[in-house]
Image: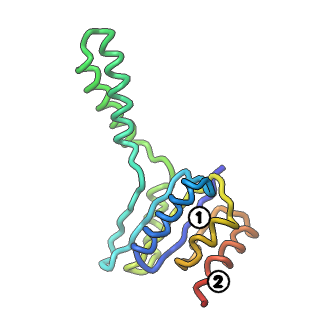
Amino acid sequence: MSNLIAISYPDLPTAIAVRDRLADLQRQNLITMEDVAIVERRADGTIKLHQTSGTTGMGAAGGALWGGLIGMLFFVPLFGMAMGAATGAAAAAMTDAGVNDAFMREIAGKLEPGTAALFVLVVQSTPDKVIPEIQSYGGHVIQTSLNREEEAQLREMMEGIGAR
């Protein structure tokens, strides 16, 4: 089961830096993330979602492959590929995997203009190695699906550095 962690940052570049650092830590197998996204509340109050991966392209590629294979059975591989790509892209575009966009927009509505929030769905992690790596960026824990004890520990570790 994944745990959702949402942390606010004073600006978009800081949230991006933390996201990139978490990606590095995932390559080192210190954390496994199901999804990571950033929501930005711009100075004019508008909200912008920054998703890390789109499923539309992958759906189109998979659909083209299967469509081409099926098309070869009926001697129309190009038509099959085109139809498969279109179907795969449409299906993937309608799929909302990971953190719910409406939830992210709701949280972003509560942010101060000019700030950003990082949303991470964590499958597995080694907190004693991951948290020190992102602690120096500061941040304020907005919401988690962790139990109370784990959330309190995370808040203490994340916000303790900001007091220095």
Find residue 51 and report its horizontal and vertical position in percent.
41, 57
Front tag of 2 and 1 = 2
Find residue 83 and report its horizontal and vertical position in percent.
28, 25
**Does 107 sit above or below residue 90?**
below
Residue depicted at x 37% and y 79%:
114
Q: Quadrant of residue 84?
A: top left
Q: Say whether disc 2 or disc 1 marks the residue closer to the N-terminus.
A: 1
Residue depicted at x 59% and y 75%:
135
Find residue 58 and report its horizontal and vertical position in percent.
38, 38
Question: Furthest residue to the top?
Answer: 74
Give the amino acid type for the residue marked by disc 1 in the picture.
Ile
**Does 62 sit above or below residue 139?**
above
Q: Quadrant of residue 140?
A: bottom right
Find residue 151 and report its horizontal and vertical position in percent.
69, 70
Residue depicted at x 24% and y 14%:
76
CA gap between label 2 and label 1 equals: 17 Å
- Would you say 106 lies left or right of 29 here? left
- Would you say 16 lies left or right of 133 here? left
- Residue designated by label 1: 5
Residue contact at pointers 2 and 1, CB within 8 angstroms: no
Regarding mark 1 in the picture, which secondary structure is present there? strand
Residues 25 and 159: in front is 25
- Residue designated by label 2: 160
Give the amino acid type for the residue marked by disc 2 in the picture.
Gly
Question: Furthest residue to the bottom?
Answer: 164
**Does 162 sit above or below residue 151?**
below
Residue depicted at x 56% and y 78%:
136
Q: Which mark is residue 152?
A: none
